Image (cartoon, rainbow, N blue to C red):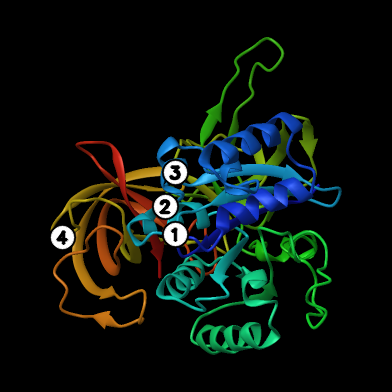
Amino acid sequence: MEMLRFATAGSVDDGKSTLIGRLLLDSKAIFEDQLESVEQASRDKGDDYTNLALLTDGLRAEREQGITIDVAYRYFATPRRKFVIADTPGHVQYTRNMVTGASTANLAIVLVDARKGLVEQSRRHAFLATLLQVPHLVLAVNKMDLVGYDQQVFDAIHAEFTDFAAKLDIGDLAIIPVSALLGDNIVTRSENMPWYEGPSLLHHLEHVHVASDRNLIDARFPVQYVVRPQSATFPDYRGYAGRVAGGVFKPGDEVVVLPSGFTSRIASIDTADGPVDEAFAPMSVTIRLEDEIDISRGDMICRPNNMPTVTQDVDAMVSWMADAPLRPGQKLAIKHTTRPARAMVKELQYKLDVNTLHRTEDATSLGLNEIGRVRLRTTQPLFCDPYQRNRDTGGFILIDESTNRTVGAGMIN
């Protein structure tokens, strides 16, 4: 069964958590005791309705303030598809949490309050979703019940967002009027909006085509672990385990190993369920080669005539996630696919205003939640592709070596 990972985004109080609660409730994905607990918690807060946001807002501070702070992950399935939801916060100071949640998503739902229309955060989150190369975007115009299900309100927001989206690189956009609180157009089509002729939100999520989003052209296999069981059953077994990051691998294919440049052929591809005839992203497999080559964690197996860029100079957009700012000359640890190295910030080319898309060329540092274009020099060569071509081999994280905390996420240009 195919899986769809999607993230919700939008401004504070646009109803992201309520939307997810309604999806879970109406698709029969929550247990009765969970529902009873939420009903009780709603009564304790003095609400005269079941507050579905409490299904995802698990932190005590979130429930007390009625806001989402951390990324909450929820899982549910319908007969057609399995879903992983990342409920991301709306506040400006939690931009980094939104980046975390959307970085692995196939689709992003940006919520807009029908009464307020497009606000700064709606534009910010739509831009971040395109920066993170999320292939599918849904604009959910929520709280339609509070504007009397007025088609003119929806049409005005539709026109404004379509105009803004023209400046961004959005591959697939759907705009759906909904009421998360009352369930209009969430799982089933709403009778309150006969003027809307499109699908419900769940129908769209079940049928959006995600198989072609993966890069099946550039074969990339970062080695995670060398498998040497040295048991009586497999006396000479040597396999290279990892997750396929792109392309298709088959037994008999000629491959090259980076950084050594040695070539060989694939002898077999094994999985936990036995050998397979081909491996493609995002399968986790063990590849055996015909020749004995010295390969270790962080090396990459690819095709001789289709190799990634091997470089120690990296030009990337970086989303900064630490309180202390990023400055030129700073030294950090970098992790790219399975390959660790150290990096120095050579240059901050510009800082990007996420709301106006304006570039500040004379910026001297990147503060918390800011995004800018940075040049790095690494101690080890990285095997990378542009982030637009491959999110796995085009993305990396930056780590503060003194605290071991992730301080930045980068997308290679």
Q: Which mark is residue 216?
A: none
Answer above or below: position of 9 versus 32: below
Residue at the extreme top: 232
Contact flag, marks 1 and 2 (Cβ < 8 Å): no
Measure how far apart labels 4 and 1 are at the Cα level.
Answer: 27 Å
List the residue tagged with mark 3: 62
- Dot 2 falls on a residue whose secondary structure is helix
Badge 4 marks a residue whose secondary structure is loop
Task: Check disc 1 and give the amino acid type.
Answer: Gly
Q: Nearer the viewer, mark 4 or mark 3?
A: 3
How far apart are labels 1 and 2 at the CA level? 9 Å
Residue position marked by numbered label 4 in the rendering: 327
Residue density around tag 2, few if under 14, some if 14–19, many if 20 or more, within 10 Å: many
Single out the mark in the foreground, 2 or 4.
Answer: 2
* Residue wearing tag 2: 97
Give the residue pinned by disc 1.
90
The amino acid sitting under disc 3 is Glu
Please rate how many residues cluster around mark 3, counting C-alpha atoms within 10 Å: few if below 14, some from 14 to 19, many from 20.
some
Q: Pick whichever of labels 4 and 3 is earlier in the sequence.
A: 3
Residue type at the position of mark 2? Asn
Residue 41 image position (x, y, % from top left): 57, 36
Q: Earlier in the sequence, mark 1 or mark 2?
A: 1
For marks 1 and 3, give the CA distance. 12 Å
Question: Is 268 or 189 nearer to us in this picture?
Answer: 189
Q: Nearer the viewer, mark 4 or mark 1?
A: 1
